[in-house]
Amino acid sequence: MNFQHTEDRHMLADSLNRFLSEKNGIEIRHQSAGSALGFSREVYAGLAELGTIGALFPEDAGGFGGTGFDVSVVFECLGSNLAVEPLLGALVVGQALIAAGTDAQRAALESIMAGTSVAALAHEEPGSHYELSHVTLSATPAADPSAGDWVLNGRKAVVPMGDAADLLLVSARTAGQPLDADGISLFLVQGDAPGVSRRGNGRIDGGRTAELTFTNVAVDASALLGAPGQGLAVLERISGYALLALAAESLGAMDMAKDQTLEYLRTRKQFGVPIGSFQALQHRMADLLLEVEQARSAVINAAAAVDDTDRTTRERALSAAKYSVGRIGTLVAEESIQMHGGIGMTWELPLAHYAKRLVMIDHQFGDEDHHLARFIALGQAAVCA
Amino acid sequence: MDLQFTPQEQAFRDDVRAFLKDQLPARIANQVKAGQRLSKADQEEWHAILNARGWLANHWPEAHGGPGWSTVQKFIFDTECALAGGPRIVPFGVNMLGPVLIKYANAQQKAHWLPRILSGEDWWCQGYSEPGAGSDLASVKTTAVRVTDASGDHYIVNGQKTWTTQGQHANMIFCLVRTDREAKAQSGISFLLMDMNSPGVDLRPIRTLDGDCEVNEVFFTNVKVPAKNLVGEENKGWTYAKYLLTYERTGIAGVGFCIAALVKLKVIAARVLKNGKPLDQDPLFAARMARVDIDLENMKTTNLRVIAAAASGGVPGAESSMLKIRGTEIRQEILSLIRRAMGPYALPFEEEAQYAGYAEPLLGEPEAATAAAHYFNYRKLSIFGGSNEIQKNIISKMILGL
């Protein structure tokens, strides 16, 4: 057993933290997070140059990492620096290309890793509420083959950086009913393809999302990623990377929220003494520390399991981690605000933005309840098998 | 990082499993799994089996009869034992006093007392808590006054200890005593070894809420203790006491017992029916079970991380307080779920069914006879060894710097 990161990963984390603290200080971060683009192209290019995006993918795909611990190290740094750059989209779309893409499709990895192309997963739909197999956007064979091979119609909800994305990975139903496991197909669609209309929104925790409407969007057969109708397994696989990434990001953010709250307890005086001398707050802080250490263990478990070939082992560890950071992240956010008192409610305080991110992570790729239920279902399926 | 056990560690685990399969008496394992109370003879028998294999004092260095295990090996051993239904090693001599003697006692004391712990010749109990003190151990009032007379150097001890677990079986007690009444609370305490059979020692059992009598009050009236039974220096006992407590807390985390209890819970929940379906398919019960399952998975890794950090030779520090809090919370939650799983059959209580050899037909599920008693008995986990609130004070001071 060994709980030490390799030297390479230490160096990656160090340079990443140095870069982000210089180039993504809180004021700059607020500007880019609230901008029309939702992030900073300059910061994103810098991250790519440092090898941050390449670290998410294995060597045979042109990267230099790709293991669970590479992913967790990168996203923990992003979380502790509150970065809004679209690495999550790069991770999931890139992993989909690796898992199911043709050579021609995999060529897109190069610009993704270079940070010149923004990729996004367009999967969630209004009303799907995290359920992976809930896909209603339809893909039907084109009546007029000269315009393309498939025609997409439907809506996608809350697509991260959906208005800026160059490349969309779109889940679509080519057969069956909304919750069927079979009949889901994946398509690679250019963000500005004719018939795709995008309505962008700012997010409460910074960055942007978009509601996408597909109206008779025609795509060629070469846009189909993997076998038709067999997209769910790929979706589960890439969602697994997202669960790990988000859990690690949450851990990075909760470490910062915890540190900032602790510093506040040591310095803020009331009744003539530092408020950290009050036992009521000491015990809450001790609980936070304990919970954050549990979250750290959950992320380690998930990073070790993300490449496990046994589906139940892998997915249970991933759901356990997302459940854990969902519960603990929200707790850390709420307790940190409470212990800061009034100042915790202000935009001025960086802590408030960590708190928002911590809570909002629970709204991506399934919340605490969703993953607890999934953890149970996976266990019952394993017993029955 | 690599969370897998090394091939050597896996081979060690196989060794432990083989040993348990051959050597752990089925009668004892069945009693443990059924949650029945063990007799002194049962516990002594298991100690003797472990000692014969050289595995009893697994925290001790080889020079004193320990097996020379790594912290990971100890973890594997504890977990495998718990899963196999091995009784908890009575911790007072082996896990608590032993390390203190090894670190602080003089050569003569080590040579005399350590082998007797291993052989079972002495059964130790702990004389820390006093009435009205609770987790505030530094408020020790039991006094020891040094006198020299014709028969030699002695301490005369007066006072009272309480919550003395398994004191009814013990022939020896290690005590915190006040040797300087003028000094500040923590600087006038000494660490003294006393013979329970000395004139002036009186033991009274305390009946606990589950009906058992595993704890006792111990009274000292002018008890004469040879001065050579002082460990370390006079008035420096607090240092030794704290050292002992870090060992106690790590043990109390009881990850192995949590794992074994969760396995038991899952077996029960798959068998007990509600509305014609197993309880583990009831959404609310399944959710409670899944939460504690995930918390325990995280806890296992947290525990291994602390072990890995301490593997460089350090003793567990304030991190043991984190393990104590979370480990005890998890174990209490599992015991609570086992109790809930019994439904109304948690209500009937038959004292005799807590012991092996109960011949009457059991009511309800086989676990129903002990489930509620266990739940109540193990409320102690978050109280003893320094209450979980005290552990939070330690964390806030030692780790958080508040």
Image (tube, rainbow, N blue to C red):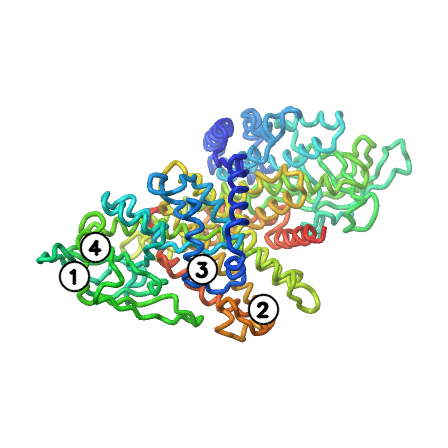
Residue shown at 81%/41% (left/top)?
A: A229
Residue shown at 63%/34% (left/top)?
A: A91
Lower sequence index among marks 1 and 2: 1
Is mark 1 in CB contact (under 8 Å) with mark 2? no
Determine the secondary structure under disc 2: loop
Q: Are marks 3 and 4 on the same chain?
A: yes
Per the image, the residue denoted by label 4 is B189
Lower sequence index among marks 4 and 2: 4
**Callout 3, which amino acid?**
Asp
The chain under label 2 reads B
Q: Characterize the local packing of mark 3: few (<14), some (14-19) or many (20 or more) Cα atoms within 10 angstroms.
A: some
Mark 1 → mark 2, Cα distance in angstroms: 52 Å
Residue sitting nearer the eye, B279 or B288: B279
**Callout 2, which amino acid?**
Met
Determine the secondary structure under disc 3: helix
Asked where in the image residue B34 lies, by quadrant, the reply is: bottom right
Mark 4 → mark 2, Cα distance in angstroms: 47 Å
Lower sequence index among marks 3 and 4: 3
Tell me the mark number nearer the camera, choosing from 1 and 3.
3
Residue B19 image position (x, y, % from top left): 51, 46
Q: Are marks 1 and 2 on the same chain?
A: yes
Per the image, the residue denoted by label 3 is B42
Per the image, the residue denoted by label 1 is B156
